[in-house]
């Protein structure tokens, strides 16, 4: 594993073309170290998802620099960014995006559908990822038979399949009741202890309080709390 911070943003700006142009991110500088758990809070429309898309290499900043595990990403070609994303980053969303007619383990395996070079041992790694989130006993179930919390844990197993160093989560507990929210937060705590870095967008106080660090975005400007 590379030394140094997992995430280093320097003066990142993101503008969207519109009339007038939208300033979604304004001169954001942020450093996140390995094993950190960072919560991003802020009102709707403030730039949280845009920031997560930049961190996830789904979108490029208009200006500024983004080092991921020490690699400057803003100047990489699309193909290299896609490979780096596959190697380093897992995504978790509010809705679980599980295919209803595929078993839990098959859903986890689908994470690498497009990475043919990685296919060897995929089922074994999917089963190991399910064990890691405490769902080994549900591998053969269809998603419809799982509770909401179990579905989100299956989605987290899918995000872990490529052995990422960074987990990016957009409102991961937004569809869960408080008991299942606690279970997912306990899982995040375990994953952090194993060295995973977690960045999580949330509106829920109980979720941001469990994070080690909290930043707030307002109109594209980030402030540490
Ligand atoms: P949040 O996730 O905090 O609700 P977003 O990051 O989705 O906020 O959006 C931040 C701002 O950027 C908003 O004003 C939104 O309308 C604008 N925006 C987001 N994506 C686009 C886009 N693809 N094109 C134009 N404007 C966008
Ligand atoms: Mg959003």
Image (cartoon, grey):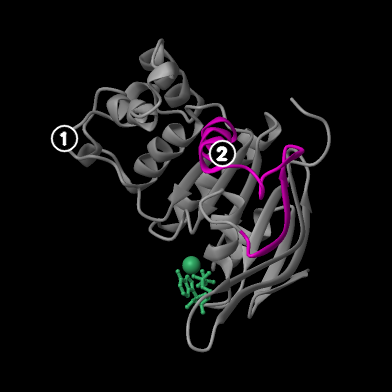
The alpha-carbon separation of the residues under discs 2 and 1 comes to 26 Å
> Position of 191 compared to 10: left or right?
left
Residue 63: give x, y in percent of width and height. Answer: 69, 64
Within-10-Å neighbours for mark 2: few <14, some 14–19, many 20+: many
Task: State the SS at label 2.
Answer: strand
Residue reaching furthest to the bottom: 20
Q: In this rendering, is residue 112 above or below 92?
A: above
Q: Nearer the viewer, residue 67 or 139?
A: 67
Which residue: 58% across, 32% down?
164
Q: Residue 69 lies in magenta, yes or no?
A: yes
Which residue corresponds to the image point at 55% horizontal and 64% vertical from the top-left? Answer: 50
Q: Position of residue 125 (x, y in %)?
A: 44, 17
The numbered mark at residue 101 is 1
Segment colored magenta: 61-89
Of residues 128 and 148, the one nearer the viewer is 128
Indicate the position of residue 66 as horizontal and vertical percent values. Answer: 71, 51
Above or below 30: residue 152: above
Q: Between 103 and 89, which is closer to the camera in this rendering?
A: 89
**Above or below, comparing residue 187 to residue 63 in the picture:** above
Secondary structure of the residue carrying numbered label 1: loop
Residue 161 lies, with reference to residue 197, above or below; the image says: above
Q: Residue at x 47, y 27 (%)?
A: 161
């Amino acid at each position: 594993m590379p030394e140094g911070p997992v995430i280093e943003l320097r003066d990142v700006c993101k503008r969207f073309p519109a009339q007038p142009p939208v300033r979604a991110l304004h001169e954001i500088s942020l450093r996140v170290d390995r094993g950190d758990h960072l919560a991003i809070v802020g009102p709707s429309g403030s730039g949280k998802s845009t920031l997560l898309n930049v961190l996830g290499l789904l979108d490029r900043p208009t200006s500024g620099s983004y080092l991921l595990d020490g690699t400057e990403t803003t100047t990489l070609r699309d193909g290299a960014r896609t490979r780096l994303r596959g190697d380093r980053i897992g995504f978790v969303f509010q809705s679980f995006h599980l295919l209803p007619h595929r078993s839990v383990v098959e859903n986890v395996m689908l994470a690498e559908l497009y990475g043919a070079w990685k296919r060897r041992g995929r089922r074994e790694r999917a089963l190991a990822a399910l064990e890691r989130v405490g769902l080994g006993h549900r591998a053969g179930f269809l998603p419809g038979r799982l509770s909401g919390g179990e579905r989100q844990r299956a989605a987290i197993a899918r995000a872990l399949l490529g052995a990422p160093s960074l987990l990016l989560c957009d409102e991961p507990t937004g569809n869960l009741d408080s008991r299942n929210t606690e279970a997912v937060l306990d899982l995040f705590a375990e994953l952090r202890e194993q060295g995973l870095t977690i960045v999580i967008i949330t509106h829920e106080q109980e979720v941001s309080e469990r994070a080690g660090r909290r930043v707030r975005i307002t109109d594209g400007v980030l402030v540490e709390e």
